[in-house]
Amino acid sequence: MIAPCLQLAWRYVARHRLQTLLLAGALALVTALPLCLRVLVQATEVAMQDRAISTPQLLGARGSALDLVLTALYFKRQPLPAIPMHHLAEIRAAKLGDCIPLDVRFHAQEAPIIGTEIEYFRFRGLNLASGTMMTRLGDCVMGARLASQHGLKPGDAIFSTQEQVFDLAGVYPLKMRITGVLAANGSPDDDAVFVDLKTTWLISGLAHGHDEVATTRDAVLKQEDGNTVANASVRMYNEVTEKNLGTFHFHGDNGEYPLSAIVIVPKDAKAEALLAGRYLKDKSPVQLIRPREEFEKLMSTLFEMQTLALGVLTVTLGAALAIAALVFALSFRLRQREFATLGDLGISPGALILTKSFEVGIIGGAGLVMAGVITLLVQINAHAWVRLMLA
Amino acid sequence: MLSGLRMPGISVTDLQFAYPGSPFRLRVQELEVAEGSSLALLGPSGAGKTTLLRLMSGLVEPEKGTVKLGDQTLTGMSETQRRAFRLSQIGLIFQDFALLDYLTVEENILLPQRFRGTRTVSPAGLELAERLGIRPHWNKLASRLSQGERQRVAIARALAHQPRFLFADEPTASLDAARREIVMDLLLDYTREHQACLVMVTHDTDVIPRFPQQARVEDFTS
C-alpha cells in the first residue's frame, strides 16, 4: 500500500511545483533562521574571542571600553579621543611589561591604517608572505586579504585617504611604499595597512617634508624671532623618497603626539594588578581595561539578544507551522471530491490518510532539506561574513 | 446449474432508500441483471438514476433490502469488505469522469490496480486503450485532454482490471456519434465476452435500443 500512496503523493507535489516550492521555502526559512542566528553568533564569538583573550590589557582614552576594544583589537574606527604619547613612555619606564602603541585613525582605500611598532607583528604572530618589513618613514606592510583584494604587492604604492575634505591644516593623502605583504592569519590584521607610528603622524600633519626654505630665497615670507615663515610656493612632499627623506621633520612636543591605544602585556600577575590600580582614578583621562572582560560583557549582551531573537523566531516558526497546517487542511478540503473518487474506486481510508501524510512529509522534508542547505551555506560562509562585518 | 438458464449477476430485492429530510424515496421490489447482460437505467434528470446506480454498486447503503452481486451479498458486507470488493470486482464510470488531473493517462488507468499491487497495464488493458483511441495520449497529463478523451480514459480505467460488474453513469454523454458507437460496442462486447453485468444510466435515445433490459427509475420512486 505504501508504494502507490507515495507515488500518488509525489505526483501531486511534483505537478504543483511552484506551490510546493513556496510552502517548503517558507518552512525552510523559518526553520533555518534560528539555526543561522546561532551559527553566526558562534562564529562572531570565535572570531572575536581569540584576539580579546590574547590581549591582556589595553590603555586608551576614558569613555566607552567597548569602543576602545573595537578600535584597538578589531580596527573598527570609533569616535575615540586620542591619548598622548607620554603614557607610553611612563608605562615603559615603570618596567611592568611590554607596551605596543597603536594609532588607528586613518584609512587607505577603506582599509584601516595601523600605526604601530615592529613588536606588534611578533605579538600577533604575523609573518611576511612576501617582501620585507617597513624600513623607513612612508613604508607600509599590507594585510593578506587586502593585498589580494586590490592586487597589491611589494614595490607598489597605496595612498592614504584624506579624512576631511576641508582640512585647513593641509593634511594631504600620503603615497606609501608597500614593502611587504603579510601571511593570512584569519583576523582583522588581514584587512589592514601597517605603518610605523611616525608615518601616521606624518599623515596627520604633525610631520612633513618640503623644499629647503633657506636655499629658496623667493619662498621666504618673513623672518621673525629666529623663525622663517615661508610662502605657498614651497613644495610640500606627499611621498617619502630616498632623496627627500632628510627633509621630513616633526613639529611640537612628541610627548603629546596622539595614540589611539596602547596594548600592554604585563610581565606577571603582580604587574598586571599594579597597572590596573594605577589607572583606577575616576579623574584620570585614560582607562586601563581587560579586553577579555569587555568581550565577555559584549557576548553576554549578544547572547541575551540571541535568546530574545530565538524566542521571536520560535513564535514565528510556530505561526508558520500553523499556517502550513491550515494550507494543507484547505488543500485537502478543496480536493475532497478527488479523495471521494479514490474511496469510490475502493481505495481504503487508511491509504488516503497515508497519501495525505506523504504529501505533508514530502513538503515538510523538502523544507527541512532546504533549511539544512541554507544553514550549511551560512556555516561555510559564517567566518568570512563575520570578518566582513568586523572589518 | 441447469443448462440454458442464465444465473442472476445482479439481484436487487425489496430495496428502500431515502435521503434524510427529503421527500424523495426509492423503492425497488425486484430487479435482476443476468450474467453477460446489460441494463439501461432511464428517466428524467433528478429521478434517482445515479442514486440507484450507487446503491447497486455499494457506494451508498440502503435503508432496507438486499443487493447481491454474483454470489456476494453487498448489503451484508462491512465498509472495508465493500471497498475491497469494489476495487477487485467492480468497474465504475463516473458522470464527471473523476480523473486525477496530475496523473498521466497511463497512471489514471492503472490507479485502482496499483492499490491491488499491479505495476503495469496488462496486454488486455493496452488493447483496450488502443480500441478507445487513447494510446497516443498515453503519457499526457489528464488535465491536457479534451472532454471526449477524458471520458474514454475513464472507461479504460473502469475496464482495465476486467471487473465482473460494470456501473456506468452516462458514459457516452460527451462523445460524438462515431466514438459513441465504439464505446457502446466495447462495453456490450466486454459484458458478453466476460460474462459481466453492465448497468448504465443514459439519456441517449440512440443507445437505449441496444440494451436487452431497460428500467425506468420513476417506476421505483415516490
Image: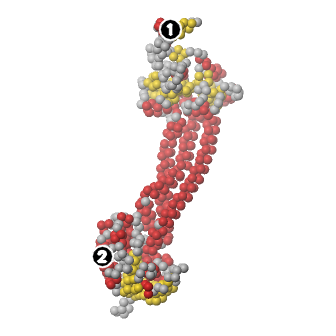
**Residue drawn at the location 47% of the way across and 50% of the way down:** A373
Q: Secondary structure at mark 1?
A: strand
Foreground residue, B216 or A334? B216
* Chain assignment, label 2: B
Q: Position of residue A287 (x, y in %)?
A: 66, 28
Q: Are marks 1 and 2 in contact (CB under 8 Å)?
A: no
**Residue drawn at the location 45% of the way across and 76% of the way down:** B84
**Would you say residue B44 is visible in this rendering?**
yes
Above or below, comparing residue A17 to residue A179 in the picture = below
Image-quadrant location for residue A286: top right
**Would you say residue A133 is visible in this rendering?**
no
Which residue, given by chain and number where applicable, does mark 2 sit on?
Answer: B177
Q: Position of residue A325 (x, y in %)?
A: 53, 60
The residue type indicated by label 2 comes to Ala
- From the viewer's perspective, tell me whether residue B12 is left or right of residue A295: left
Q: Are marks 1 and 2 on the same chain?
A: no
The label number, if any, that marks residue A182 in the structure image: none
The label number, if any, that marks residue A220 in the structure image: 1
The residue type indicated by label 1 comes to Val
Above or below, comparing residue A248 to residue B143 in the picture = above
Q: Residues within 10 Å of mark 2 (few under 14, many from 20)?
A: few
Above or below, comparing residue B85 to residue A328 in the picture = below
Image-quadrant location for residue A156: top left
**Residue drawn at the location 51% of the way across and 54% of the way down:** A27
Q: Position of residue A316 (x, y in %)?
A: 57, 53
Q: Position of residue B149 (x, y in %)?
A: 34, 69
